Amino acid sequence: MDWLTTFPGFNYTQDLVKQFLARIIITGPVPKHVGFVMDGNRRFAKKHKIELKEGHNAGFESMAKILEICYECGVESCTVYAFSIENFKRNKFEVDWLMELAKLRFTQIVQQGELCEKFGIKIKVLGDKALLPNDVLKVMNKAEEMTRDNKRAILNVCFPYTSRNEITNSIKSIISSKLPSDQINEQLIEDNLYTKDQAPLDLLIRTSGVTRLSDFLLWQVVSKGVEIELVDTLWPDLTPLHILWILIKFSFRKTYSQRSKTNFEEDKQD
């Protein structure tokens, strides 16, 4: 309800509420790895009768706020679906603008980097980088280099990415190692994915009410215990309070599941 924001002290009160809830969430089960399908930028632009590029810009602004609250709550890795390989099929104007926007945002990270410094975030760009323009690739590589020694948290930016391409890349890596076929198994494929050496995916969030995965983290999402949260809100409209509520629900579900498992084991012993 936008009219609430007009009250004096609203932003200050909202920040206090966020800090209070974050302190509560961090004490309970927290997803170590959260994936985001940031859907709805184009519909946001249409809804508000603004240019398409402004819709994407609003989406990037929302991403910074969402990531900050996740790291404040103790999430170790966030993986965002920033640009699909399939997006290259969109009209040239939109693709060129998304490339310029990515370059601008990564340049800001390199020049300022407050969020990365505050939470000790290591940036990793996941995807087929060979498809990127040289100027965009140069800025992304610089952001990765600048944050490579950060240890506290990870931000995976999938750009350009599809899960099928990731799995294909894993298989190619295995083939190049010339291992005998009888040594190739699921674990080996997983060990060669882009997300190797990171915490397993715990929670996947998709906005805009769409009920499909769109070729994002398909291998990771089928692991036992992964939860999928489908949100009707468009990505630029998603707020930290939305994320806090999702994390609270995750914590309650995991706590209940653990207690039920413990009770079941105790009943078996009796």
Image (cartoon, helix red, strand yellow):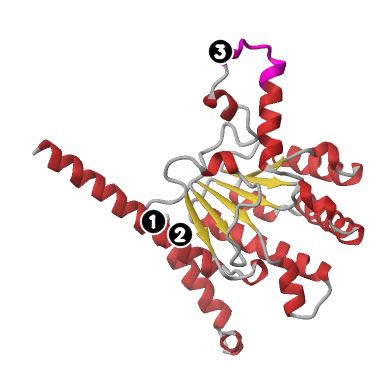
Q: Residues within 10 Å of mark 2 (few under 14, many from 20)?
A: many
Quadrant for the N terminus, please: bottom right
| Element type where label 3 sits in the image | helix
What kind of residue is marked 2?
Leu
Q: Which residues are magenta?
A: 174-183
Q: Residue at label 2?
A: 247
Above-or-below relation of 196 to 231: above
| Element type where label 1 sits in the image | helix
**How much space separates mark 3 and mark 1, taking CA atoms?**
41 Å
Rendering coords of residue 61 (x, y %): 71, 65
Residue at (53, 26) in percent of width and height:
186
Residue 148 seen: no
Q: Nearer the viewer, residue 196 or 40?
A: 40
Asked if the residue under mark 1 is in contact with the one under mark 2, i.e. CB atoms within 8 Å, the reply is yes
Question: Which is more N-terminal, label 1 or label 3?
Answer: 3
Q: Nearer the viewer, mark 3 or mark 1?
A: 3
Q: Is residue 22 magenta?
A: no
What kind of residue is marked 1?
Ser
Q: Residue at label 1?
A: 251
Question: Horizontally, is 72 left or right of 139 in the view?
Answer: left
Residue at (71, 24) in percent of width and height:
172
